[in-house]
Image: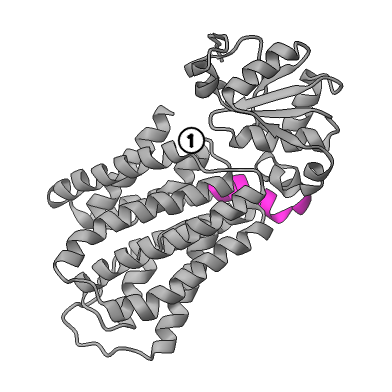
């Protein structure tokens, strides 16, 4: 979790130093450092990016640096597109979403490498409204699918198509990002609920607060750091990160069978939910269940690093859900004829793991939620080493 918090600081600092771009780090930080499932991470990213953008838009709005016509003609199609992209994600494997996200990262890096500034002094003519609306719709769908704010696309569009000055475009883009992120997040809550998942509100709050604070610090430091070199360095980092994600998620995105078998796509097997009901219990209900069911097997599906940092429930079997061949490892460690109680950090990975086990024929499965809540409820814990 420490690395995830450092990632949140990096998001805020980059936003403050560069004025944009930091939000594109949110999804990989949530997936690879906070160990959130892909679709959950995208939803949480929308909430975090939307909150940061809303706070950032306030000073621009006070200075009347928001063009409400552009909010209407660009923002409304963007809101509809984001909502539609979030709805479309229900049928798209998470590995494909992450691969698309990697492509967006590399595209953003390319725009930063070019380093070509828009001439703010040149007179510009507002382009046809339908063209502005189409651009807004496209950026909105992209936001809904991969969870980025899209400021690196919105600001140039508002300047070149909408005829706005740079400062007016920045303020307007922040308000648009906040509005369409809210629409996409709202839809994702439905998509996740249907998959038996939920966002981690505590994580969202922590990331949003740290991101906002970091952006103020970064803004204060921006005058002391050469912007051109900083942008090129960050662009290089985006290329490396995008390549990493493509290498990791690309094979799953290109192979439907591998993507379906991957742990992060366990929610793509609805048939298991129809045949085996996964019970979701509160910490107190879990304690009562374990006391009444001594034969139950307790499984911790967090990573070894998470377990080493906080400990685990007494006698729990640790089977990392994010590791390859989770199903095979779980089958080796568990008795298919005995009940299984699963937990993780927030309950999302436990829910996905339960779906995998249900598909394997385990008849009685319980999602007990997060470790911290279980420990607070009085369940016995013990230290573990990796």
Does 119 sit left or right of 52 as displayed? left
Can you say which quadrant of the picture contains the N terminus?
Answer: top left
Does 117 sit left or right of 87 as displayed? left
Q: Which residue is mark 1?
A: 34
Query: Residue at the spot x=58%, y=42% of the render?
Result: 37
Q: What scheme was used to colour the molecule? A: one colour
Query: Residue at the spot x=73%, y=13% of the render?
Result: 292
Q: Which residues are magenta?
A: 244-257
Q: Position of residue 318 (x, y in %)?
A: 65, 19
Q: Quadrant of residue 316?
A: top right
Does 159 sit left or right of 146 as displayed? left
What count of labels does the image hold? 1
Residues packed near mark 1 inside 10 Å, few (<14), some (14 to 19) or many (20 plus):
many
Query: Residue at the spot x=50%, y=22% of the render?
Result: 372
Q: Position of residue 179 (x, y in %)?
A: 38, 64
Q: Decide whether residue 248 is among the magenta residues.
A: yes
**Whether residue 301 is visible:** no
With respect to residue 268, does 349 lie above or below? above
Q: Decide whether residue 329 is among the magenta residues.
A: no
Determine the main secondary structure of the stretch shown in magenta. helix
């Amino acid at each position: 979790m420490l690395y995830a918090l450092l990632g949140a600081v990096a998001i805020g600092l980059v936003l403050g130093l560069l004025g944009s771009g930091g939000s594109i780090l949110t999804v990989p930080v949530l997936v690879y450092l906070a160990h959130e499932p892909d679709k959950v991470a995208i939803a949480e990213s929308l909430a975090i990016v939307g909150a940061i953008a809303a706070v950032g838009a306030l000073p621009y709005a006070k200075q009347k640096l928001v063009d409400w016509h552009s909010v209407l003609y660009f923002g409304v199609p963007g809101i509809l597109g984001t909502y539609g992209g979030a709805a479309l994600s229900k049928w798209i494997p998470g590995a494909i979403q992450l691969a698309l996200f990697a492509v967006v990262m590399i595209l953003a890096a390319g725009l930063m490498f070019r380093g070509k500034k828009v001439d703010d002094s040149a007179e510009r003519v507002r382009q046809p409204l339908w063209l502005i609306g189409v651009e807004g719709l496209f950026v909105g769908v992209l936001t809904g699918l991969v969870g980025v704010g899209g400021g690196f696309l919105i600001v140039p569009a508002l300047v070149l198509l909408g005829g706005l000055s740079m400062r007016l475009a920045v303020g307007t883009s922040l308000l648009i990002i906040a509005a369409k992120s809210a629409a996409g997040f709202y839809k994702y809550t439905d998509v996740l609920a249907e998959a038996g998942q939920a966002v981690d509100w505590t994580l969202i709050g922590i990331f949003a607060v740290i991101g906002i604070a970091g952006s103020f610090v970064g803004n204060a430091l921006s005058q002391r750091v050469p912007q051109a070199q900083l942008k090129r360095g960050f662009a290089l980092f985006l290329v490396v990160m995008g390549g990493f994600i493509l290498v990791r998620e690309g094979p799953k995105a290109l192979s439907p069978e591998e993507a379906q078998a991957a742990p992060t796509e366990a929610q793509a097997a609805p048939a298991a939910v129809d045949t085996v009901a996964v019970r979701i219990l509160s910490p107190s209900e879990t304690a009562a269940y374990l006391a009444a069911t001594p034969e139950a097997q307790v499984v911790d599906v967090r990573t070894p690093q998470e377990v080493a940092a906080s400990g685990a429930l007494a006698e729990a079997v640790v089977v990392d859900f994010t590791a390859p061949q989770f199903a095979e490892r779980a089958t080796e460690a568990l008795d298919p004829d005995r009940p299984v109680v699963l937990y993780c950090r927030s309950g999302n990975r436990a829910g996905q793991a339960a779906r995998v086990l249900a598909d394997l024929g385990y008849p009685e499965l319980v999602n007990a939620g997060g470790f911290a809540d279980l420990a607070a409820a009085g369940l016995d814990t013990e230290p573990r080493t990796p």
